[in-house]
Amino acid sequence: MAEIQPIRGWRYGPGLSSQIDRLVSPLFDVVSPRQREALYQNPLNSIHLSVPRGDDPAGQALARLREWELAGVLQQDELPGIYVYYQYFRLPGSPREYCRKGFMCHIKATDWAENVVLRHESTLPAAVNDRAELLARTEFQSSATHGLYRDEDFDLEPYLDEAMRSPLYETEEDYQGARDVLAVIQDADVIRHFQRVLAAREVILADGHHRYEGSLAYRQARQAAAGEAYTGHEAWNFHLMYLTNAAADDLRILPTHRLLLDLPGIADVPDLLARLEPYFTILTLDDPYDLPERIAGKQWAFGLYLGEGEVYKIRLRPEVHAQLDWPTTTEVKNLDLTVLHYFVLEKVLGIVGSEAQRQWPGVAYVRNFPECLTRVNKGEARAAFITNEVSMAEVERVCHSGAVMPAKSTFFFPKTIGGFLFSSIAERETSAPFTDVFRV
C-alpha cells in the first residue's frame, strides 16, 4: 500500500554538525513567537527555511537555500538511504527514559480517498496554502511529518538498532527536552526490505496534516501540468515522513486540555453548574491537583476548575449520550473530546457545530496542566476543562472509520524537529544515480 523511497538527504556540513543543537528548530505550527525571534538571530538556523519571514517569505527561503548550498552550509549525501531517527525523552513524574524509534524516508503523497495515508484531523486551508507555496518555490523539505505503521513483529527494529551503533550526529537536548539521534541505512537489500514491509501497510498520519496536504496539492498541480508525460516516479510525487511503529510502547500521546477564555451567556459558577447538571454528574473536590488522577481511565470524565475552591469532577450521564447527533461515526461520537465539545461547547455555551467551534476564539488548547490552573487563578480564563489523553487504539479506530477527530485531539510527544534532515523533490532527484534501483 504505502510506497516509500530512500533519499539522498541534505544535512548541515561536517563543520556544523557539532553545533546541531543551535541549528534545529521547532515545527512551524508549534514554534512560539518568542522562540522564533530567538532562532532568527542565528543566520544558519533551519527556521529560515521552515518558517521564513519578509514580504515574500517563500522567496526569502529560496534565496537562503541557494546561498547555503553554494557556501556548503548544507551538503547532500552521495548515496541514497533511509535515515534512522531516535528520540530519547522522559515524562514528568516518571523515572523511565523512553526511546521512540523510527526512520525518515520519502513516501508517495497519496490522496486521502486512496486509503493509503489516513488522517485523523481536519486542516485549515490558509495553512495548507502556505506550506504548498513554500514547497513549490523551494522544492525542499525541512522537516518530516510523523506517520504510523503497525508491525506487531517489530521486523524493522533490529536494522534500526544496528544503524544506531554509528550515529551521524545527535542533539544534547532539543527545545522540548528530548535527545535526538540520526543514523543512516544505505544497504540496498535492507532498504528494499523496508519497502516490502511498508508496501503491505497503510500509514496513519500522526502529525503534520498541513505539510502533507501541501505536498499533495503540489503533486497534483505538477501532475496536471505534466499531462501524458507523467510517470509517477517524479521526485515531486514524494513527501518526507518519519515513520514509527504504532505497536511500540514508546509512542506517547499527551492530553490537550480546554481552557475557556469566555463563558458566553453564563452569569456565574452556580449558573454554569446548573446548565451542566442535566448532562453530567458533578462531584465537588478539594484539591485541583487531584483532577488528573480522579478522571484517569474513566470514559467521558473531565476535571473542571473554576478558581480557588471551585474544583469539580464531571462525568457524562450515560443515558444522555444518545443525544449526540453530530453527523459523524460512532467511533468519533465515543471520544471524550467529542462529548466535551458537544455537551459543553454546543449545548451549554451555544457554540453550535464543529466548524464554529474551530473558529471560536474563546477556547485555548493547553497541554500543561498547572498552566491551566494558573491562568484561571490570574483571571486570564474563566474555566479549565481537564481531559484524559486519547489512546492509540482510538486514533486507529477513528482513522479506519473515515472520520476525523475534534480539533486538537492528539499531541504525539515528542515532536520531530526541523533541520535535522532535509530532502529535495527537485527534478534532478528523479534522474539521480541509484534512483532506478529502488523503484517499486
Image (cartoon, rainbow, N blue to C red):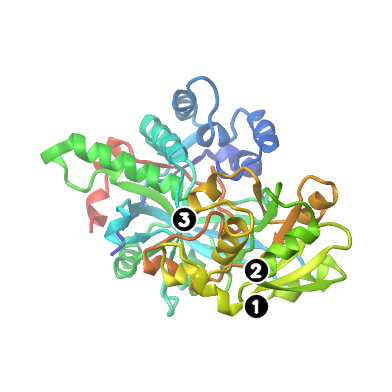
The residue indicated by pointer 1 is: 297
Q: Residue furthest top?
A: 55
Helix or strand or loop: what does disc 1 sit on?
A: loop
What x and y, as percent, mark residue 372? 76, 55
State the separation of the CA atoms marked 2 and 1.
Answer: 7 Å
Mark 1 or mark 2, which is nearer the start of the sequence?
1
Q: Is residue 385 left or right of residue 427?
A: right
State the separation of the CA atoms marked 3 and 1.
Answer: 23 Å
Helix or strand or loop: what does disc 3 sit on?
A: loop
State the separation of the CA atoms marked 2 and 3.
Answer: 18 Å
Residue displayed at 63% across by 54% down: 349
Q: Amino acid at mark 1?
A: Gly
In what quadrant of the picture does the C terminus appear?
bottom left
Q: Amino acid at mark 2?
A: Asn
Q: Is residue 369 left or right of residue 164?
A: right
Label for residue 121? 3
Q: What is the number of callouts on the image?
A: 3
Q: Residue furthest left?
A: 228
Label for residue 388? 2
Helix or strand or loop: what does disc 2 sit on?
A: loop
Mark 3 or mark 2, which is nearer the start of the sequence?
3
Judging depth in this view, the residue of 237 and 166 nearest the camera is 237
Quadrant in which residue 284 is drawn: bottom right
What is the crowding at mark 1: few (fewer than 14 residues within 10 Å), some, or many (at least 20)?
Answer: few
